[in-house]
């Protein structure tokens, strides 16, 4: 698919390309977001993402969520297991070429699977979701960490990445540039 095609065209091409897998009408959909209720609940985005993910599951899709593991998320209330330890996330910075994260998985009572991207410096030691001068770095880490994890460390690979709000805005760009030849991600659509 040419890089110059619009996102709408890419999604249409993906959705209407007949393959045995797509004929079922069921997709693996990852919703990447800075917040999702009840884990990180600041505004309407958190409720919208959580509700959308649960609605997609009810329709038979395999919908999952990927969010930062903020320090205020109660691990006793929301137990999770490490599914990737020592995830090296490229930064593009010569002084600090990568950041090391962990990815944890939580299974909610509503059958929603939630991946938490752990990084002490940028998420766990912060009291708030938003409002830091290094927010651009924090959100780039979320987007890149998401792609690194699903491209290199997960057996489950999304058919569709659903990027929510500007904080995950790097996903469409990186998916079509840095990951365009990735053997696991090259055919994933993004909305």
Image (cartoon, rainbow, N blue to C red):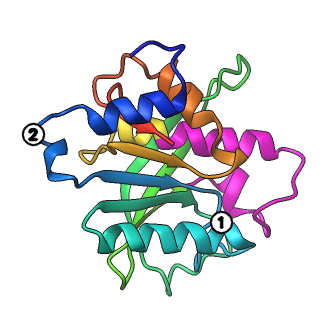
Residue sitting at 87 percent across and 53 percent down? Answer: 132
Between residues 7 and 187, which one lies in front from this camera angle? 7
- Badge 2 or badge 1: first in the primary sequence: 2
Please report the bounds of the magenta region as a residue range: 118-146
**Residue 183 falls left or right of residue 97:** left
Residue at image x 71%, y 16%? Answer: 94
Q: Is 15 above or below relative to 42? A: above
Q: Which residue is mark 2?
A: 20
Secondary element at image label 2:
loop
Q: Foreground residue, 94 or 50?
A: 50
Query: In the visual, does 19 lie left or right of 123?
Result: left
Dot 1 corresponds to which residue? 70
Q: Does residue 123 show up magenta in the picture?
A: yes
The image quarter containing residue 97 is: top right
User: Is 148 covered by the magenta stretch?
Assistant: no
x and y, in percent, of residue 99 in the image: 61, 37
Is residue 31 toward the left or the right of residue 25 in the image? right
Tell me where residue 35 appears, x and y as whole percent.
64, 65
Disc nearest the viewer among 2 and 1: 2
**Mark pair 2, 1: CA separation:** 39 Å
Residue 21 lies, in percent from the top left, at: 14, 43
User: Mark 1 and mark 2 in contact (Cβ < 8 Å)?
Assistant: no
Alpha-carbon neighbours of circle 1 within 10 Å: few (<14), some, or many (≥20)?
Answer: many
Mark 2 is surrounded, within 10 Å at the Cα level, by few (under 14), some (14 to 19) or many (20 or more) other residues, namely few
Task: Count the numbered circles shown.
Answer: 2
Question: Is residue 74 visible from the viewing direction of this image?
Answer: yes
**Disc number placed over residue 37 in the picture, else none:** none
| Residue at 58% in and 26% down | 173
């Amino acid at each position: 698919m040419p890089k110059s095609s619009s996102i709408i065209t890419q999604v249409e091409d993906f959705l209407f390309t007949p393959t045995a897998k797509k004929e079922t009408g069921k997709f693996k959909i990852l919703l990447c977001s800075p917040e999702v209720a009840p884990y990180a609940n600041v505004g309407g985005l958190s409720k919208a993402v959580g509700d959308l993910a649960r609605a997609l599951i009810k329709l038979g899709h395999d919908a999952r969520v990927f969010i930062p593991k903020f320090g205020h998320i109660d691990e006793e209330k929301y137990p999770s297991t490490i599914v990737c330890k020592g995830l090296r996330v490229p930064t593009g910075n010569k002084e600090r070429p990568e950041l090391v994260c962990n990815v944890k998985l939580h299974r909610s009572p509503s059958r929603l699977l939630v991946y938490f991207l752990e990084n002490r410096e940028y998420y766990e030691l912060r009291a708030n979701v938003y409002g830091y001068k290094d927010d651009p770095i924090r959100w780039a880490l979320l987007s890149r960490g998401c792609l690194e994890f699903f491209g290199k460390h997960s057996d489950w690979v999304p058919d569709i990445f659903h990027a929510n709000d500007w904080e995950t805005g790097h996903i469409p760009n990186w998916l079509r540039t840095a990951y365009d030849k990735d053997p696991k991600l090259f055919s994933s659509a993004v909305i």
